[in-house]
Image (tube, coloured by chain):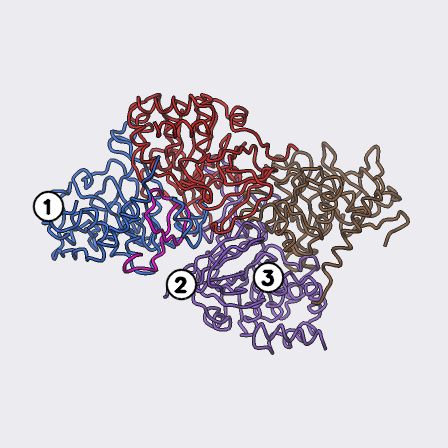
Chain colours: A red, B purple, C brown, D blue
Amino acid sequence: MPWLATVLSLAEAVREYVRDGATLALEGFTHLIPFAAGHEIARQGRRDLTLIRMTPDVIYDQLIGAGCARKIVFSWAGNPGVGSLHRLRDAVENGWPGPLELEEHAHAGMAAAYAAGAASLPFGLLRGYIGSDLPKYNPRIKFVECPFTGEPLAAVPAIRPDVAIIHAQRADRRGNVMMWGVVGVQKEAVLAAQRSIVTVEEIVDQLDAPPNAPANAMVLPGWAVTAVCEVKGGAFPSYAQGYYARNNAFYKRWDAISRERGSFQAWLHRHVLATKDFEGFRKSLESAANA
Amino acid sequence: MPWLATVLSLAEAVREYVRDGATLALEGFTHLIPFAAGHEIARQGRRDLTLIRMTPDVIYDQLIGAGCARKIVFSWAGNPGVGSLHRLRDAVENGWPGPLELEEHAHAGMAAAYAAGAASLPFGLLRGYIGSDLPKYNPRIKFVECPFTGEPLAAVPAIRPDVAIIHAQRADRRGNVMMWGVVGVQKEAVLAAQRSIVTVEEIVDQLDAPPNAPANAMVLPGWAVTAVCEVKGGAFPSYAQGYYARNNAFYKRWDAISRERGSFQAWLHRHVLATKDFEGFRKSLESAANA
Amino acid sequence: MPDANGHTASEIMTIAAARRLRNGSVCFVGIGLPSAAANLARLTHAPEVVLIYESGPIGAKPSVLPLSIGDGELSETADAVVPIPEMFSYWLQAGRIDVGFLGAAQIDRFANINSTVIGDYRKPRTRLPGAGGAPEIAAFSKEVLIVLRHDKRAFVENLDFVTSPGYFDGGGTRERMGLPGKGPTAVITDLGILKPDAATKELTLASLHPGVSVQQVVEATGWPLKIAPKVETTAAPTAAELATLRDLNARTARAHAGQA
Amino acid sequence: MPDANGHTASEIMTIAAARRLRNGSVCFVGIGLPSAAANLARLTHAPEVVLIYESGPIGAKPSVLPLSIGDGELSETADAVVPIPEMFSYWLQAGRIDVGFLGAAQIDRFANINSTVIGDYRKPRTRLPGAGGAPEIAAFSKEVLIVLRHDKRAFVENLDFVTSPGYFDGGGTRERMGLPGKGPTAVITDLGILKPDAATKELTLASLHPGVSVQQVVEATGWPLKIAPKVETTAAPTAAELATLRDLNARTARAHAGQA
C-alpha cells in the first residue's frame, strides 16, 4: 500500500532517504529529539548536509563534530541549561573539522518559516526582528507592508527540507503517528518536507491517547509520513513523555566529552561509529559507565 | 482573582459584555455551536450587531430573523445538509426584518483572518481567491507580493471581534476550558477577541482528557477567557461530543419553522423570547412536541 | 424512485462518481452527494480511500452519512482531527488532496462554477450558501470532480457569479493563473459524464448513463455542447453497488430520524 | 558561597527578580536564573503567577527547576501545552505576556542586549547561543526584566551585536519603532537594580543590594553610570525567601543528578 508510511529499520530509512548534500530538519524541541536518527546519519557517513533546527543542541553538535554538516539554519545554539556547544563553536570559530555556514534566525521567525513550509506558502509572516541586528546579517529576513494598515512586517522564506526527521511516542501499523507533551514544530517539519522519517518508541495495534498525558495529543496520518521506524529509547538523552525522562546528567556530561576534539572523537568512534545501531550505542555507553 | 475567568450565568455574561452595535463572533463549526448564547442575545433584544461566523447556519438565521443583526461576515450560509437559511435569504433578498449587509469570504480566507486576529497580525496570508469573483465584491480581499518569489498571495484583514462566544465541553473552577472533537476556529475566535464568553456542558473539579475522545483535546487557560457559564445542553441542536449527538431532526424541522415569517415569529416568541433561559427553551420545545 | 433502468438519477450519479476514486487516494469531501459517493467508494472498491471533511476529520470512516460537514460520527472515526485554520493551510493549500469533490448551482463550459447567487450579486434573485471551501478546493486539489443535476438552469452560457475556477476561459489559462491542481477532470451528472477537451478544456460529452440519449444531454445544456468522437456508455450499476448504496442510505435515514 | 551578608550573588539576584513578579501576572520564562526567580515567586508571594515556557507549556508548576526549556516536568504540570508556532504567534506576538524575562551576555546603557557573539559576527571571538525567543520577548512582553551579573565585560559602551532591543538610542525611539511593550523596566544584577530614566531611558542605578557601594557598581559598569538622586537599598532576603530558594535548588540538584 504505497499510500501508507513504510515501516522499516532506521538504517534502511537513512540509507534510502538521506543523501549527501541534502537539506535536513531534525526537530524536537528539547522533547523527542531524534538522537538515534542523528547517530545513524553519522554512522553512515553522510556529508555536506544543510542541517535545519531551531535549537541545534547536542544532536547537531555531534553531527557537526562528525563532519556531516556544511551549513546550519538555526535560532538558538546551546546546550540547554549547561552552556556552549563546543563542537559547533569549534567549527564556527576555528573551522574544525571544516567550515560551517550559518543561517541565523530568531525562534519566532523559524516557527513562522516552518508553518509556511507546512502550508506551502512561500514565506512566513510575523511581527518580529524589529531592532535586532539579525536582518543585517541574514538577507533572508525581509520586510513587507500590510496592504490594509501600511505597517511593516517581517517575512522569512518558508522552510522546505528534503527530509524531516522526528521522534514520536507511538505509531500504529499503518504508520499513523501519535505524539503529545511538548510537540514543538515536529508536525510542521514533517509537513514542510519532501519526505519524512519518524522514529517511535513503539508500534502499537491501536492508537489511543494515554491517560495522564497532557491533553494535547496530535496524530499525523500515515499517508503524510514517508517512513516509520521503531527505535525504543531513540530520543535518549532527550526524553519521551510517558516513556522516560530527560537524562540531564548526560547533557551535563556532554560538556566535558565535547570540549576537546580528542575526547569528542574518541567518544564518537567508540560509542557511535563502532556500534551497529542505537541499541549498540546504549550498551556501549552503559559498559563504559560500569567499567 | 481578576486574572481568571469569571464564572457567572449566561444572562449576566450577555448583559455585561454584549452591547448593541457590537461585533460578535459566535463560532463552532457544526460542533459545539453556542445556541444558548445566541438565544440569550435575542432574548435581551440586542440590536445592530455585526455577526461574524464562517458558517452562519441556524444560529444566525435565528438572530437575523429576530432583528438583532446589521451585518454578517461569513463564508458559507446554509442549513447544512438541509438547504437554505430562509431568514437570512429573506433579509438579503427582501430586506426583512431590516437590511442586512454582507461581507463575504471563502472558508480559507476566514480561517486565515481568524488566525491573524489571534496572532495580532494585521492580516492573514493565503494562497486563495484566484479565479473567484469574491474579491470583486469584497474590497477587504487584497493581494500582496511575496518578497522572495514575486508570487501574488491573497491578504485578508484580521478578524478582531469585540466579543467571541463559543461552547465547549468542560471548564474547571478556574475557568480553564477544555474541548475536543471538531474544534473549528473556536480557539482563534476567543484569542482574536477583546473579550470572550465560553458556555460549557459542565464545570468540573479537574480537567482530564476523556477516554475514547478523539486525541485532539485543547485547553484554553482561564486567564485568556473573560467569562465561563455552565449551560448544560447549550449547543442544542448542535452537539457536544462525549455529551450528546447532533439533533439532525431539528435541523430538518428548522426548514419548515423558518420558511415563513409568521411561523418563525411564532416559534421565536413562544420558545425563545417568552422563556427565561435555555432550560426554559428546551422545556417549551418538549411540551410543544408532546402536545 | 428507480426508473426503467432500475436506479434513480441520484444513484447513478453517486455510483459513477464513486467509481472515479482510486483506492488510497486522499479525498476532500463535501456534504451530500460527494459524501455519499466517497463513502460508497470506501465501502466497495476503495477501502483505503482517505476521506477528509473540511470541519477537521482526516481519515473519517462513518458508518452512516453525515447530515452536516461536522457530525460527531466523522471525528469519532477519523485518524486525526485538526483545527480549521490547519485544515485549510497545512492540508488543502499545501496540495495534499488528490481529489476534491464539488457541487454547484451553475456551471459553464469551462467548468467554472457558481454556488453564490442567482441574479445580480447585490440584488440577488436567489441567495445561495456561497463559497465555503470551494474556491480553494478547486484551486489546490490535484484533481476536481464536479457532481450536479443536468438541466439548462445549471448548465449555463454565462455564470451569474464565478465562485470557483475551473479552466477560466479555457486552453492554458488555468496554468498561467498559477493554480497547481489540474482542475476538473470530470463533471458527473444524472445524464452522463462530461470531460474537458485536452487542448481547449471545453467540457465534452464523454459518457452517457444507461438509457440516456445524446439529444437529451444536448437539450439539458445551455450552450452548444461538444460531443466526443466516441461517446461511451456508463456501465450500469452493479447489484453490489446498488445494494451497498441503498443500505448506506437506509442506515443514514434511520440515524437522522428521531424527535426534533 | 554565601558572603558576609548571608547570601550569594545568585541568590540576591534571584530574590530581587522574584519580588518584581505580581501575583497573577503572566510570565514568559527563560531557563536558568529567570526560571528560578519565577518559580521562587510562585512558591512565595505570587502563587497564581502564570509561567509560560517557550517550548509550549502554559501555566507550568514544576516542583523542581527544569534544566532545559522543555523538561517533562513543565508540560506535565501545565494547564495547556501548545505547539511552538502557536506559542510565538497566538501567545507572545499577540501581547498576552505581562513580564518577559531575559538574560544577556552584554547590555548597553539603553538596555539593548547581545546574546549572539563577542567580537565580529562573521569572525567571532566567542560564539554565543544566539537569539532564541529574545527579540520577540523584548518586543512584545508588556514589560521586560533583564537579569545578569554586573561586570565591565557585560555592561559595555557598545554592543558587539544587538540581539534584542531595549530602548534603542533612548528617549521615544522604542515607541516610534512601533514596539508595543514598554520595554525593560529593571535590570537586576548581583550588585543592584538599574532602572530606565523616565525621559531619556538611560539605565540609572536605583537600588543597591545589601553591602554594595555605589563605587563598586560604577566600577563594574563600562559607561559612566547615572545614579538616581535617591538610591535605595534592596531589602535583604528574608529567611523564608532564602529557605524556599535553597530548598528549590536542593530538590533540583537531586533531580538532575544520576547516571549519564
Q: Residue C182 falls in which quadrant of the image?
A: top right
Q: Is residue D257 visible?
A: yes
> Which type of secondary structure does the marked residue at label 1 adopt?
helix
Magenta: main secondary structure equals loop
Q: What percent of the width, then of the height, locates residue A144?
A: 43, 42
Query: Where A232 sits versus A261, above or below?
Result: below
Locate residue C110 relative to residue A106 in the image: left or right: right
**Mark 1 on the same chain as mark 3:** no
Q: Chain of mark 1?
A: D
Q: Residue at x 61, y 38 (%)?
A: A174
Residue corresponding to mark 1: D216
Q: What percent of the width, then of the height, locates residue B16?
A: 45, 71
- Residue D56 forms part of the magenta stretch: yes
**The label number, if any, that marks residue B4 in the structure image:** 2
- Residue C177 forms part of the magenta stretch: no
Amino acid type for the residue under numbered disc 1: Gln
Locate residue C5 relative to residue A214 in the image: left or right: right
Task: Answer few, some or many: residues within 10 Å of disc 3's Cα (few below 14, many 20 plus, some between 14 and 19).
Answer: few
3 vs 2, front mark: 3
Q: Residue at x 67, y 47 (%)?
A: C61
> Which type of secondary structure does the marked residue at label 2 adopt?
loop
**Mark 3 on the same chain as mark 2:** yes
Going from N to C along the chain, the mark reached first, 3 or 2, is 2
Q: Which residues are magenta?
A: D42-69
**The label number, if any, that marks residue B243 in the structure image:** 3
Q: Are marks 1 and 3 in contact (CB under 8 Å)?
A: no
Q: What percent of the width, then of the height, locates residue D203?
A: 19, 49
